[in-house]
């Protein structure tokens, strides 16, 4: 981080958030009109081709930091065209009574990837350099492409009205409305976007809290601690019985916030690591609850658009929050910013806890 400045060093993160915003916005226009499998294959293949081109350019030309901004932007944009299609495909493959376990498996695999990427990414980069690191990234996209290619499922777009009738019967216990008229989804969007806007302040202040005191090495460890907590809970969440999907989601936010607050006020690194671990425990509840609220309140043929629009709004809020958060953290205490943000987030979560519209039956 240049001069220990969170604002100056946030360029890669901001470019990724902008890519997330652009990719999600574009995906919202076509994700429900094209077979989800085709979107996922196109995303993986394009990212793999892009990395091949980038590796060639790096070996033949001198690259500036702008190159990494562009790489972060493009890979993020393509990735967030992939994610809404993947989330929708879960509802195409399994029925409502299997959604919790399906999303649990998705969260479990994501946690494993997070642990490996954070724990091994820095080691691989320090030993082998940027070329091998990006080459491994390339192999991951090729492997993902292969798995999607051999996993064939039928999209509801091509099943005809009888299939839609069956899906509507399955979802008959839930309030299904058009996306623009669905108050439950709108309220979810408001909570998620406001929560992540404030979270961006927290994340942008993290480097200033950790690196000057505990070193950049420990800054890299935080993702592994978070991933371990997420992995443990991802293995258990399918065995926990909830009467309300909304409680799953809120519990995730509350646990995540508790861990963040501990990390914000920590004066020793082991206490900070404990906070990150606790925050990771809340992540599967948060992720699974958010997806299931959409999956059980939006008809399958509109779910891709709902997921993409949620990511679009949240990405925009993350960009604004990261820019202002990094600037403010440069001017005043990072600990104060992180603590103050957690307090506001706690108030928001408590406020939405009493929103009766969001207490969706599981």
Image (cartoon, helix red, strand yellow):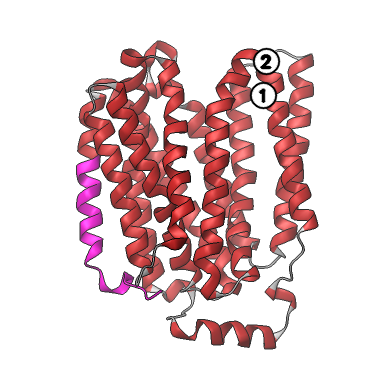
**Residue 133 got which mark?**
1
Question: Is 342 left, or right, of 238 in this rendering?
Answer: left
Quadrant where the C terminus sits is bottom left
Q: Is residue 348 magenta?
A: yes
Q: Position of residue 69 (x, y in %)?
A: 58, 28
Q: Position of residue 52 (x, y in %)?
A: 78, 30
**Residue 128 got which mark?**
2
The residues bearing labels 1 and 2 have C-alpha atoms spaced at a distance of 7 Å
**Kind of element beneath mark 2:** helix
Q: Which residue corresponds to the image point at 35% horizontal and 72% vertical from the top-left?
A: 243
Give above or below for 67 relative to 145: above
Q: Which residues are magenta?
A: 342-362
Q: Residues within 10 Å of mark 1 (few under 14, many from 20)?
A: some
Question: Is 212 left, or right, of 124 in this rendering?
Answer: left
Residue nearest the observer in this picture, 97 or 77 = 97
Give above or below for 91 relative to 54: below
Residue nearest the observer in this picture, 47 or 171 = 171
User: Residue 68 is drawn in which quadrant?
Assistant: top right
Give above or below for 335 relative to 142: above
Tag 1 and tag 2, C-beta contact below 8 Å: yes
Q: Residues within 10 Å of mark 2 (few under 14, many from 20)?
A: few
Give above or below for 43 relative to 126: below
Q: Which residue corresponds to the image point at 52% horizontal and 75% vertical from the top-left?
A: 97
């Amino acid at each position: 981080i240049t001069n220990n400045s969170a604002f100056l060093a946030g360029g890669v993160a901001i470019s990724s958030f902008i890519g997330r915003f652009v990719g999600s916005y574009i995906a919202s226009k076509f994700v429900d009109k094209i077979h989800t499998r085709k979107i996922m294959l196109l995303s993986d293949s394009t990212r793999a081709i892009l990395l091949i081109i980038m590796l060639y350019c790096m070996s033949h030309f001198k690259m500036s930091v702008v190159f990494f901004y562009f790489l972060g932007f493009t890979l993020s944009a393509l990735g967030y065209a992939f994610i809404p299609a993947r989330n929708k495909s879960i509802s195409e493959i399994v029925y409502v009574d299997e959604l919790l376990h399906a999303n649990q498996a998705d969260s479990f695999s994501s946690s494993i990837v997070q642990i490996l990427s954070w724990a091994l990414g820095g080691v691989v980069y320090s030993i082998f350099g940027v070329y091998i690191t990006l080459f491994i990234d390339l192999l991951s996209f090729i492997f993902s492409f292969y798995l999607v290619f051999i996993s064939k499922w039928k999209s509801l777009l091509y099943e005809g009205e009888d299939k839609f009738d069956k899906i509507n019967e399955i979802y008959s216990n839930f309030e299904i409305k058009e996306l623009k008229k669905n108050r439950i989804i709108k309220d979810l969007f408001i909570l998620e976007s406001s929560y992540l806007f404030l979270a961006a302040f927290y994340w942008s202040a993290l480097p200033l809290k950790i690196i000057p005191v505990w070193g950049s090495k420990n800054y890299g460890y935080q993702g592994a601690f978070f991933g371990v907590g997420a992995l443990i809970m991802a293995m258990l969440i399918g065995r926990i019985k909830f009467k309300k999907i909304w409680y799953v989601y809120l519990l995730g936010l509350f646990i995540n916030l508790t861990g963040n607050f501990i990390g914000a006020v920590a004066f020793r690194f082991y206490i900070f690591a404990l906070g990150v671990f606790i925050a990771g425990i809340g992540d599967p509840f948060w992720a699974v609850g958010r997806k299931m609220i959409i999956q059980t309140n939006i008809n399958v043929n509109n779910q891709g658009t709902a997921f993409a629009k949620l990511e679009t709004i949240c990405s925009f809020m993350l960009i604004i929050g990261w820019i202002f958060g990094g600037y403010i953290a440069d001017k005043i205490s990072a600990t104060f910013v992180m603590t103050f943000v957690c307090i506001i987030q706690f108030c928001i979560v408590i406020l939405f806890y009493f929103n009766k519209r969001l207490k969706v039956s599981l």
